[in-house]
Amino acid sequence: MKSSFALLTLMAPLLWAADADRDGVPDGKDACPDSPVRTVLANGCAPSVIRPVVLYFDTDSDRLRPEHFDQLARFVADGVDGTVVIVGHADNRGSLAHNQSLSERRSAAISNALSARYGVDPARIARRGIGETLPWRDNVTETGLTLNRRVELWVETGLRLTNGEK
């Protein structure tokens, strides 16, 4: 027992040296070797919470509001290093076909603004409309209807989270 403890005591500095940022992931498998955080994923990088940018629309409208331009400018300023995914939604006012078309027009309006105003390459934009199929809230109250008339957009980087194995 004493020899195991002595061996561990001698090897401890070597083990720590293999993990310079002391996050528990050996440097050889650490994709973020200078990560200052202690809670990391198996690849050594801090977990990130991906939250879409959400833009709300007026009833039966695909026209961008003035505040949308500020939100889009901030979105682009944060960096677009991947595919921009744009998903349009609608509340349940109108027919299924109308709401599907409306949600597609909303996502197209955002896509067009990103390309024309902010220089995002259209080849890096994926857009679609899903009509009224995924409401955030009920379609009974005005608040619910308002929250369902939206476009969500985020950047899909294509990075995979792994355990560091190749």
Image (cartoon, grey):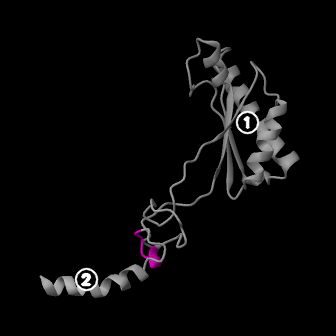
The reply to whether residue 92 is visible in this rendering is no
Alpha-carbon span between mark 2 and mark 1: 59 Å
Q: Which residue is mark 1?
A: 107
In the shown orientation, is residue 38 left or right of residue 81?
Answer: left
Give the camera-side residue of 12 and 118: 12
Label 2 sits on what residue type?
Leu
Residue 8 got which mark?
2
What residue appears at the point 44 percent right and 72 percent down from the top-left corner? 22
Above-or-below relation of 33 to 146: below
**SS state under label 2:** helix
Q: Quadrant of the N terminus?
A: bottom left
Q: Residue at x 58, y 47 (%)?
A: 50
**Residue 78 percent coordinates (x, y):** 72, 53
Residue bounds of the magenta highlight: 24-29
68 or 25: nearer the viewer = 25
Residue 144 disc label: none
Q: Quadrant of residue 114?
A: top right
Specify the quadrant of the image occupied by residue 91: top right
User: Image quadrant for the C terminus?
Assistant: bottom left
- 33 sits to left or right of 53: left
Q: Is 156 situated above or below 68?
A: below
Inspect this view and state whether residue 48 appears. Answer: yes
Residue at 51% in and 59% down: 46
Q: Residue pushed farthest left?
A: 1
